[in-house]
Image: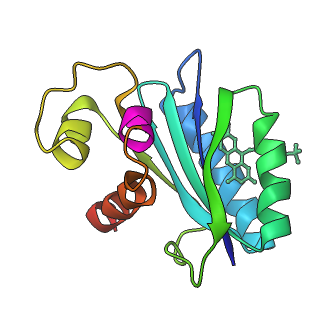
Amino acid sequence: MFELLYTSVSPEGLTENGLLEIQLEAQKHNASIGVTGMLVYYDREIMQILEGDQETVETLYESICHDERHTLVEVFYSGEIKQRAFSDWSMEVVVLDEGKVKKYLYNDRELGIENPLHNIMKTNPNRGKKTFLSLRDTYY
Ligand SMILES: Cc1cc2nc3c(=O)[nH]c(=O)nc-3n(C[C@H](O)[C@H](O)[C@H](O)COP(=O)(O)O)c2cc1C
C-alpha cells in the first residue's frame, strides 16, 4: 500500500460547483481503481492525499498533475504505508474557511500568513499527514 500527498493552487479559485464536480469525478473513478483519500481546499489552496496500489496512485497523480483546474502541483510526500487512513473515503472533499483553518490547524491563532494550508505542512515536516488525520477525525 502506498500514499502520496501533494499540494497545488487553483489560480482562479474553485467554486462550490467546481469542487463538487471534481469530487463526483474522483469518487467514481477512485472507487473503480481502489484509491481512497481526502482533498482539502481553502482559499485557492489545495492539498490531497491519495492511497492505494503504488502504480495506480502514481498514474492517477500524473493525470491529476495535468489537470488545468490547478497549478503548482507538487508532491509533498510519498511512501509505503501499512494500512489506509481513509479507507471509508473514495475521495472526501473538505472545504475550510478562515475560522476553521484557525480553529483546527492553528489553535485559534491569527493566520496573517500567505497560503496557511501549505505553510502548515511545509514548515513542519511532521505535520503533513497529521494535518489530514486531524481533519479526518474532525469531519468523520
Ligand atoms: C484538485 C484535483 C483533484 C483531483 N482528484 C482526483 C481524484 O482523486 N481522482 C480522479 O479520478 N480524478 C481526480 N481529479 C480529476 C483528474 O485530474 C482528471 O480530470 C480525471 O482523472 C480524468 O482524467 P482523464 O481525462 O485523463 O481520464 C482531480 C482534479 C483536480 C483538479
Residue 84 magenta-highlighted: no
The N terminus lies in quadrant: bottom right
Residue at image x 26%, y 38%? 101
- In the image, residue 14 sits, relative to residue 34, either above or below, namely above
* Foreground pick, 76 / 131: 76
* Residue 132: % across, % down: 41, 57
Residue at image x 80%, y 54%? 60
* Residue 140: % across, % down: 34, 68
Q: Residue furthest bottom?
A: 82
* Foreground pick, 48 / 97: 48
Residue at image x 74%, y 75%? 34
* Residue 119: % across, % down: 39, 33
- In the image, residue 45 sits, relative to residue 41, either above or below, namely above
**Bounds of the magenta segment:** 117-122
Q: Main secondary structure of the magenta part?
A: helix
* Residue 29: % across, % down: 77, 61
Q: Is residue 13 visible?
A: yes
- State left or right for residue 38 relative to residue 58: left
- In the image, residue 70 sits, relative to residue 32, either above or below, namely above
Residue at image x 46%, y 38%? 41
